[in-house]
Image (cartoon, coloured by chain):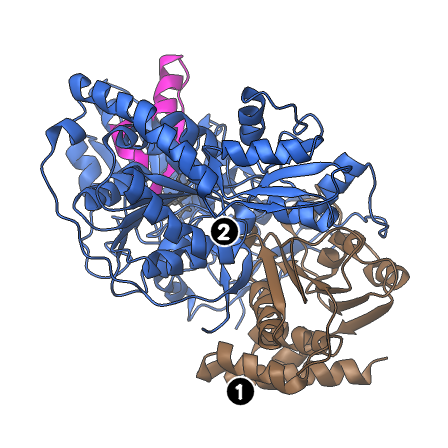
């Protein structure tokens, strides 16, 4: 079989495909997105982007009940959105295998929190597999389908950023077709009214979980690597295993493949041989707390950090109190992500930074509107929060503006807007229609009509907003600075709910790139520019504009400029021109 | 086959949009084709919007951690000046090399006067690096008619410091690039190698 270099997410896709997967659904979210993007390439798999994680979960779960192996993938916070079906589907169980892939983001490389999904799994009584690298991701996801069918339960595969995005050597094999299972109507199993749910919960606690615990002990995905009994031994899971091996090559290690429920006999054996044990796990002390509940005395998060990401340096520093010799760190420069040159959002945030109303933000590229020079965002909590929070501010007597992206609007903004209209709110909502899910790498969403594989129908945001009952709806081109500012001001003054749709495609998608194909880059005439006492052009936050240290005058870096011309509109001295 | 290659840690760093992930991918594939175990780790997502980007590539007979530990990188390939500084403490104290692309990209906070862009980057690197190779990749790429191949020029220069034969690199580049861009990338790679051989 050919050796290939695959990311953990790609390996999951290959593994699931090999296990006969037929249906996959997801809402994008770093670091989980590539699972579905990879699956979309297999003709045997029906893969799609859903409007949000709850919908994705229910689509895939429905397919599993319908008799075909299915999976759903999401980032950790997506599981909060899908938590409702997640909990109850553990009672009802599955028919064909159903796998829930959840990618946690310790260290928050691109997330708003670093919650540990294993806590959700344990609370819902769903078994959790934790691969440590792509080769294991490929193997574990196949076993997840088997475990799901054997115990009639959803099974979680918990990834973390380094496992999802790290690449490693995998030898993917062939696909095994799994015949569809028969679907039988079974109301006692699938209709979770209290009378049935009580029975299902008892079966889960008294039958399935004890059997699963015994099974965990026989599972070949755990691995005991012996070592010197005098030395500290480790219980570990996921990528943390590799960090332990890196720093403690000859210590004993019990690597857990299924991190909940734990293999109790194997643990007895391990603790019998190795009296001093430390738990090293990425995220919360989930395994550690289980071990303590079983009566073992272990070290763990008392020595290791409770937040952030682990790595070999962290283990070395915290456990050995040492570090490898290295050159002294130097100060580089802060280089946060920024709105791209030509980004359609510049006009919106330029306007908002001048209007100075509280801005209830949301999650997407546009969250970067919180950074200088705009600082035009007061809150970012979770997807869809902008509209209800603006309405809440209104109730507290403060007029606020909600800003929400188009994908986010479909994900969880619509219900908030309906609530605002229904309850007689007056808030202003700005919907950023850039025709893509930008932040996560340009996936389609209902407003684009483009699906992950083919087909699909477009849902029109403007029509939807009007149908909800918003009467004051304006559509503006956010690159027209004056018009944008005027539209937002008018909307704020309007009595009753108002929506401004800022419509212009993302500069990184073909439709957006095309707009500037013929546009010359801009330059700033240093004769006309007055420099530091103006700097108006810097307020559009374009990374292509730099400042000359000597003269204090801005200039445009030609290889970054796309020629959108927004900066031109800000210059009171008419110093910015197209290069001819 | 290749003589045995010990565990090697390479950091590829730069600014989002410079082709860092592609360059690191080529390197990782070369190591894979050489029959080694390879792990590569990078962080995607937010980092792409003009922010700092880094990729760790590790190869050898056996690789555990996908991330590189401070003080262990034998090679740092930096596509931008300040980004080189960001990772100097990851270098192995002796026995290391740095390839620096001759490019400065001033980020927004420095433009707005909220931070300062570091001075004398080359000088600092010279103190730390066993060997420092500065390549003017943007100039070469412009001369070749495609500014986007600057990353392949840098990679070509870096390839001279790695234990793989030139034809293996070419094979992987041929595999990875679409036909339309292959020729110019092969040229860029060769130019990068030539630059490295002619500079001391
Ligand atoms: C519950 C949840 N799911 C997924 C994500 C990941 N995520 C962050 S922003 C975003 C998409 C934003 O798209 P859009 O609203 O169109 O804004 P854009 O990035 O295009 O500006 C996604 C999917 C998340 N943070 N939370």
Residue where numbered disc 2 is placed? A164
Q: Is B134 above or below relative to A562? A: below
Asked whether A427 falls inside the magenta stretch, the response is: no
Chain letter behind tag 2: A
> x, y (%) of residue B13?
67, 60
Mark 1 residue element: helix
Q: Are marks 2 and 1 on the same chain?
A: no
The residue depicted at 9 percent of the width and 37 percent of the height is: A185
Q: Which residue is mark 1?
A: B183
Instruction: Using residue A304 as the reference point, say whether residue A204 is left or right of it.
Output: left
Drawn side of residue B114 relative to residue A101, left or right:
right
Q: Residue A64 location in percent, x, y?
A: 22, 45
- In the image, the segment drawn in magenta is A388-417
Per the rendering, the colour in which chain B appears is brown
Q: The residue tagged with tag 2: helix, strand or loop?
A: helix
Q: Residue at x 62, y 55 (%)?
A: B66
């Amino acid at each position: 079989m050919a050796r290939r270099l695959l990311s953990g997410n790609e390996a999951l896709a290959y593994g699931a495909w090999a296990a006969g997967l037929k249906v996959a659904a997801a809402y994008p979210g770093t670091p989980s997105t590539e699972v579905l993007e990879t699956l979309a390439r297999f003709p045997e798999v029906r893969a799609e982007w859903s409007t949000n994680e709850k919908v994705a979960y229910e689509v895939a779960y429905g397919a599993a009940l319908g008799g075909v192996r299915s999976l759903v993938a999401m980032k950790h916070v997506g599981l909060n959105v899908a938590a409702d079906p997640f909990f109850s589907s553990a009672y009802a169980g599955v028919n064909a295998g159903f796998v829930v892939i959840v990618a946690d983001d310790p260290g928050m490389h691109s997330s708003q929190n670093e919650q540990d999904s294993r806590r959700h799994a344990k609370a819902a009584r769903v078994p959790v597999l934790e691969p440590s690298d792509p080769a294991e991701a490929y193997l574990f996801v196949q076993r997840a389908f088997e475990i799901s069918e054997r115990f009639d339960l959803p099974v979680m595969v918990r990834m973390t950023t380094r496992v999802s995005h790290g690449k490693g050597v995998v030898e993917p094999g062939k696909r095994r077709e799994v015949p569809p299972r028969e679907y039988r109507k079974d109301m006692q199993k699938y209709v979770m009214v209290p009378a049935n749910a009580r029975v299902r919960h008892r079966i889960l606690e008294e039958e399935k979980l004890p059997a699963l615990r015994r099974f965990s002990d026989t599972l070949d995905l755990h691995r005991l690597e012996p070592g010197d009994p005098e030395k500290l031994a480790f219980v570990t899971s996921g990528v943390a295993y590799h960090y332990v091996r890196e720093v403690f090559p000859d210590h004993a290690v019990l690597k857990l493949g299924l991190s909940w429920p734990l293999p109790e006999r194997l643990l007895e054996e391990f603790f019998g041989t190795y009296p001093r044990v430390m738990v090293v796990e990425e995220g919360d002390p989930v395994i550690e707390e289980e071990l303590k509940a079983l009566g073992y005395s272990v070290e763990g998060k008392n020595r290791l950090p409770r937040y952030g990401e682990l790595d070999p340096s962290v283990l070395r520093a915290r456990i050995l109190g040492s570090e490898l010799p290295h050159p002294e760190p130097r100060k580089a420069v802060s280089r946060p992500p920024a709105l791209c040159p030509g980004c359609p959002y510049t006009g919106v945030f330029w306007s908002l930074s001048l209007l100075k109303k509280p801005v209830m933000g949301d999650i997407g590229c546009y969250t970067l509107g919180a950074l200088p020079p705009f600082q035009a965002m007061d809150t970012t909590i979770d997807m869809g929060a902008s509209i209800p929070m603006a309405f809440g501010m209104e109730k507290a007597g403060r007029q606020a503006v909600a800003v929400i992206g188009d994908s986010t609007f479909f994900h969880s903004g619509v219900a908030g807007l309906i609530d605002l209209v229904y309850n007689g709110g007056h808030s202003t909502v700005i919907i950023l229609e850039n025709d893509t899910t930008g932040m996560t790498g340009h996936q389609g969403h209902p407003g684009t009509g483009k699906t992950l594989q083919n087909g699909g129908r477009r849902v029109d945001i403007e029509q939807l907003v009007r149908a909800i009952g918003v009467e004051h709806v304006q559509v503006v081109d956010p690159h027209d600075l004056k018009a944008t500012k005027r539209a937002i001001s008018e909307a704020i003054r309007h009595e009753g709910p108002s929506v401004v749709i800022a419509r212009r495609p993302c500069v990184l998608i073909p439709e957006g790139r095309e707009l500037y194909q013929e546009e010359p880059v801009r330059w700033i005439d240093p004769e006309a520019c007055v420099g530091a006492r103006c700097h108006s052009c810097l307020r559009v936050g374009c990374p292509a504009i730099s400042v000359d240290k000597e003269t204090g005058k801005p200039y445009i870096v030609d290889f970054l400029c796309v020629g959108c011309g927004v900066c031109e509109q800000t210059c009171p001295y008419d110093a910015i021109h197209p290069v001819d | 086959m290749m003589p045995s290659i010990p565990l090697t840690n390479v950091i590829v760093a730069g600014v989002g949009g410079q082709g860092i992930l592609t360059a690191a991918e080529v390197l990782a594939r070369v190591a894979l084709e050489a029959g080694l175990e390879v792990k590569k780790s990078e962080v995607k997502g937010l980092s792409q919007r003009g922010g700092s980007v880094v990729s760790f590539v590790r190869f050898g007979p056996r690789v555990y951690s996908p991330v590189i530990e401070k003080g262990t990188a034998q090679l740092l390939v930096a596509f931008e000046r300040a980004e080189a500084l960001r990772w100097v403490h990851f270098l192995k104290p002796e026995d290391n090399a740095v390839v620096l692309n001759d490019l400065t990209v001033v980020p927004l906070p420095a433009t707005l006067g909220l931070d300062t862009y570091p001075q004398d980057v080359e000088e600092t690197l010279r103190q730390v690096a066993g060997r420092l190779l500065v390549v003017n990749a943007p100039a070469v790429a412009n001369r070749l008619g495609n500014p986007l191949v600057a990353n392949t020029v840098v990679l070509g220069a870096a390839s001279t410091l790695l234990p793989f034969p030139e034809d293996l690199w070419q094979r992987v580049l041929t595999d990875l690039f679409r036909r339309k861009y292959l020729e110019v990338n092969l040229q860029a790679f060769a130019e990068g190698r030539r630059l490295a051989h002619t500079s001391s």
